[in-house]
Amino acid sequence: MTANFTGPIEDRLAIRELLETYADAVNRVDRALWASLWVEDSHWDMSHYPDLGVVSGKAAIVDLWASAMPHYPQLSFLLNPGMIRVDGDKAEARAYFSEVYAEPGTGKDKRARACYNDRLVKQDGQWFFQSRSFTIIHQS
């Protein structure tokens, strides 16, 4: 165990599976699965895009995601955890991801490398996103 990965292995594995399920739901544009990963009082910080800012509440977050997905056809979203720290029923995680999609209208490949900084909460034995903060590292 390193300083980036602390806490019970069972919780760290469950959080990794939460992150991987998020990626699977994005790749398959599975609204129900994607929505199931968030708690009701969650926050999605998309202030890297000033017109989006911070979206609060599960319903608003899911609606924003669902309305955005048609703009990312042929999306491939791959994720790698860089940090998972568990403290009881709360945790923080950092996940780096790479996505490629076809630009609407041109079909040209667009690529992004970005990071999510997460706060997670365990409810009834299951981990959920409490907040996600998005930052682009590189985009082309």
Image (cartoon, rainbow, N blue to C red):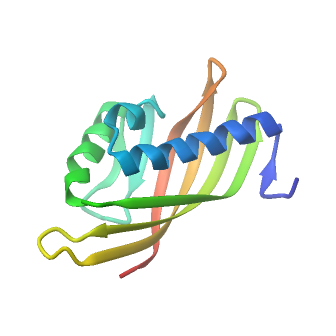
x and y percentages locating residue 7 in the rendered image: 82, 41
118 to 116, vertically: above or below: above
Q: Indicate the position of residue 115 as horizontal and vertical percent values.
A: 52, 64
Q: Where 67 falls versus 47 (above or below)?
A: above
Describe residue 35's horizontal placement relative to residue 129 as left or right: left
Q: Quadrant of residue 88?
A: top right
Residue plotted at (48% across, 34% down): 37
Above or below: residue 27 compared with residue 99: above
Question: Residue furthest toward the top?
Answer: 124
Q: Viewer-proximal residue, 93 or 43?
A: 93
Residue 22, how many percent across, how many down?
A: 48, 44
User: Quadrant location of the C terminus?
Assistant: bottom left
Near-viewer residue (124 or 76): 76
Say whether residue 41 is left or right of residue 59. right
Q: Where is residue 131 in the image (x, y as percent from the top left)?
A: 50, 43
Identify the residue at image location x=28%, y=56%.
52
When asked about the image quadrant of residue 41, the answer is top left
Work out whether residue 3 or residue 96 is closer to the camera in this orientation and state it: 96
Vertical position of residue 71 compared to residue 88: above or below = below
Tally of numbered tags: 0
